[in-house]
Image: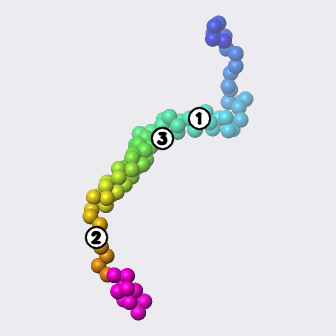
Amino acid sequence: DRTTGAVTAAMLPANTSVAAHANETWIIAIHYGTYGGEIVRLVYFAGGLVPVVLFFTGVIHWWVRRRRPQRASELSGEEFSRRTIG
């Protein structure tokens, strides 16, 4: 109870299911990044940076292609068809 400080419920490992135990120990640890030590935290960090890097490289590629002047095709449609089809 929050006013008296008395214990109203207790989660003992013997009274919980396997799923609840997995949630308490494994899933929550992964969520907060405390699972696996510093190496796993670095992998999480790198994985979090991947979408940011992909976004910015995509914007850069789009910007470069947008600023490049459009050039006309070197071969006309008829000449291209004649050379490829025969």
Q: Which of 61 and 25 is in front in this view?
A: 61
Element marked by disc 1: helix
Q: Main secondary structure of the magenta part?
A: helix
Give the label on residue 49, or none: none
Mark yes or no: residue 42 visible: yes
Q: Is residue 30 left or right of residue 13?
A: left
Q: What residue type is labelled 1?
A: Thr
Instruction: Answer left or right for 35 relative to 74.
Output: right
**Residue 32 position within the rendered picture, expressed as x and y whole percent measured from the top left:** 50, 34
Q: What residue type is labelled 3?
A: Gly
Examine the image and state in which quarter residue 25 appears.
top right
Q: Where is residue 68 in the image (x, y as percent from the top left)?
A: 27, 62
In the rendered image, residue 40, in percent from the top left (x then y), is placed at 44, 43
Determine which residue is flagged by label 3: 36
The amino acid at mark 2 is Arg
Which structural element holds mark 2?
loop
Residue at numbered disc 2 = 71
Find the residue positioned furthest to the bottom: 86
Name the residue located 65 percent from the left edge and 35 percent from the top edge. 21
Callout 2: 10 Å neighbours few (<14), some, many (20+)? few
Name the quarter where the N terminus is drawn. Answer: top right
- First in residue order: circle 1 vs circle 2: 1
Q: Which residue is drawn at 29% across and 79% down?
A: 74
Q: Name the residue under label 1.
A: 25
- Foreground residue, 13 or 81? 81
Magenta stretch encompasses residue 85? yes
Q: What stretch is highlighted in magenta?
A: 76-86
Which residue lies at the image location 63% right of the left edge and 7% below the top edge? 3
Pick the front one: 28 or 48: 48
Q: Quadrant of the C terminus?
A: bottom left
Quarter-of-image position of residue 20: top right
